[in-house]
Amino acid sequence: MADSDLKPPVPPEQQSAIDAVEDCLRQGEPLLAYNAVQEGLKAFPANLRLRQLRGLALARSGDTGRANQMLSQLVEEGLADAETLGMLARTHKDLALHTREAVARAAHLASAFQIYRQAYEAAGRRGAAADAWYTGINAAAIAVLQGDLATARRIAREVRQLCSVALASPSAAADYWLAATLGEAALILGDDAESAAHYARAAALAAGRYGNLGSTRRQAILLAERLPGHREWLTDVLRIPPVVMYTGHMIDRAGRPDPRFPPALEVTVTAAVRQRLQSLRPMAVYGSAACGSDIICLEAMRDLGGETHIVLPFPAAEFHRASVDFAPGAWGERFERALAAASSVTITSDHRAHGSRATFEYANLILTGMARLRAGVLQTDLRGLAIWDEQPPGSAGGAASLVSLWRGQQVALETVRLTELRAGKPADAVPAATAAAAAPPDDAPPAGFTHEIRGMLFADAVGYSGLSEDQTPHFITQFLGAVADLNVRTTQRPEHVETTGDGLYMVFGSVRDAGHYALELSNLVTGTDWAARGLPNGLNIRIALHCGPVYCGRNPVTGSPLYTGPHTSRTARIEPVTPPGQVYASSAFAAVAASMAVDGLSMQYVGRMPLAKGYGLLGLYHLTSAHL
C-alpha cells in the first residue's frame, strides 16, 4: 500500500488553503506564498502541509536560516515523511552554499546527505517509489557537492532505474518532477544527450510553473559547475522567459500643440507592441495602467497568456480620473478590464499629492524593484520595453526618466519609437494642434513645500518605560549621547533628526543611507553594555524603515525643518511590530532598494504583518547585513 493510501482525506477548506500556497510556489512567487500560508495557518494552525509549505516558502525566498529552524521543529515533533526531511535537507544544502567557512559548509553538506540518504533508504524499504527517487536524486546531488562522484553516480543509477519503472504508469507522461529527476540523474552520470532530452521534456511540462522550473535550473547549473566537462546547453534547455518592465507615453490630450501619441497612431503602436512582446515571450510584465502605451501592453500580454502586474501611484479611482478619463474612446472600460484581469495590483500611496511628480517617480521605482526582485528569485533576464519619442529625461516620474534609470543600470531595452511611427503615417492621419489646448495639471506643490522621496527611520528604546527617575538622565547622556556620537562619525548621516522621549525619527536622502545607518544603529545598541553606563542591561531598540514621498517644509511652531505626510505615518506604524533588536523594512523600501541596486543589505521577507493602531496589513522584510 502506498503512503498516500494511509493519509486521511483533507477537508475542502483546508485543501483550498493548501492549493493557494502551492499555486504561488509553482508560479515562482515565494513571497505571495508566504502571505497565503500565514492566512492558512491562522485558520488551521495544526495543518501539517501548511507548516511544511511555510518552510518551503521561506527557503525559496532566501530566508534559509528560519526555514531550517521551522522544519527542524517539525522533525523534532516526530515528523519523518520524505517531503519534510527533503525540505530540511535542502535548507542544509542552501546554508552550506552560502557560508564562507569551510568547516560549517562541510557540516551542513554532511547533514543534508545524511538526511536525504536515510529518507531514500527508508522509502525503498517501504516501497514508496516516488519518495525514493525524490530523496535519492537529492542525495546524489549532495554527494557531487561533497566531491564524492562515485557515490553520486551509484545512487543516480539506482534512481534512474526507479524512474524508468515509474514511466510505465499512464500518469508519468505528465509528471514534471519525474522528467526533471531523470534529467538530473543523466547529468550526474555524464550522459548529456539523455539529460538534455529529459530536461527539455520537463521544461515543456512546466507549462508556466516557473517556480518549479527555476528550482530545477538552479540545481542543474550548480551540479554542472562541479561535474567534469562543459554543459553550456543547460541554460538554453531550461531557459525561463524574461521579466519585462514597460513604460510609455499616454494618448495625447485634446489640443496638444506638439503631437506625441495621437489617437490615430493607436493601431500602429498596438501592432508594434504586440510584435515586441511576441518576440520576448515574457513570463510577466510590470508597469502602470494609463491610457495609451500602458493599457496596450497589458492587453497584449493578457492575450499572450502571461502575468500582468500593475503598479499605480495612488488609488485606482483617482488614477482613472488623472490618467485615463481625459482620453476619448473606451479607455476607461479597458482600464477596468486590465485591473480585473491583473495578477496583482499594487497601490504605492494611499492618496494623490496634487502638483507633485514624486508620487509617479515613487511608483516607477517600486515597479522597477518588484520586477528586479522577481527576476532575481527566478534567475532570469530583466528587460525593459519603452513606447516613447526618445526625448531626453524630463520631469521625474515620466517615461523618459524611467528609461534613463534602466539604461543607467544596463537593463536591456526594447523600444517602440513614436517619432518613427508618426513619420510613417500620412499627414492627414495625425491631427493638427488646435488653439484651445487643454490646461495642464498643477505642476508644483503648495507654496513653502516640496514633495520629495525620502528614506525614513523610526526607532524606539525597548525598556525605557521601566527606567527609574534617577536613570532618566543616564538615558539622555548615555543612550541618546551614543546615538549623537554615531551621527557624527557615520558616513550615512541623516538629513533630519527628531527625538521624543525614547523615540527617534530620522530622514535620509536615500534608501541606501537609511538601510546602512539602521544596521549601524542596531549594532550600536545591541553591542553596548548598558549596565556599565547606569542603565538596565536589557535595554534594546526596535528600528523600522520605509521609503516614500513626503512634504518637506518648515514647522510654523518651532521653525525647524518638517518632513511629513501619510508615508511618515506608515513608517511609525511599522516600528511597534518590529521585534526588539531587529530592523524591519516595508516592502516598498525593499523594492526601491532593489530598483536602485543598493548593495550590502540582505532582506528576508517576513510576510504581511498587521501594523499598529489598526493601520492594516503591510508586507515587511527583516533587514540584515549582506556581509554576515
Image: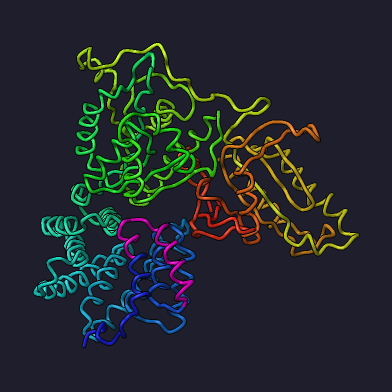
Point out residue 388 in the picture as x, y percentages from the top left corner: 33, 25
Seen as rendered, the residue at the extreme right is 470
**Would residue 43 be counted in the magenta stretch?**
yes
Residue 434 appears in the figure? yes
Q: Nearer the viewer, residue 563 or 300?
A: 300
Quarter of the image that includes the N terminus: bottom left
Q: How many labels does the image show?
A: 0
* Residue name at image x 52 percent, y 47 percent: 601
* Residue name at image x 8 percent, y 74 percent: 168
Which colour style is shown? rainbow
Q: Which of 224 and 323 is in front in this view?
A: 323
**Would residue 206 be counted in the magenta stretch?**
no
Q: Which image quarter: residue 135? A: bottom left
Highlighted range, magenta: 22-45
Point out residue 76 in the picture as x, y percentages from the top left corner: 46, 81
Q: Nearer the viewer, residue 408 or 302?
A: 302
Point out residue 152 in the picture as x, y percentages from the top left corner: 24, 68
Task: Examine the rendered structure and indicate whether residue 316 appears above or below residue 135.
Answer: above
Point out residue 134 in the picture as x, y percentages from the top left corner: 26, 71
Residue 118 appears in the figure? no
Q: In this view, does 17 lie to the left or right of 283?
A: right
* Residue name at image x 42 percent, y 39 percent: 368
The secondary structure making up most of the magenta span is helix
Task: Examine the rendered structure and indicate whether residue 120 appears above or below residue 247.
Answer: below
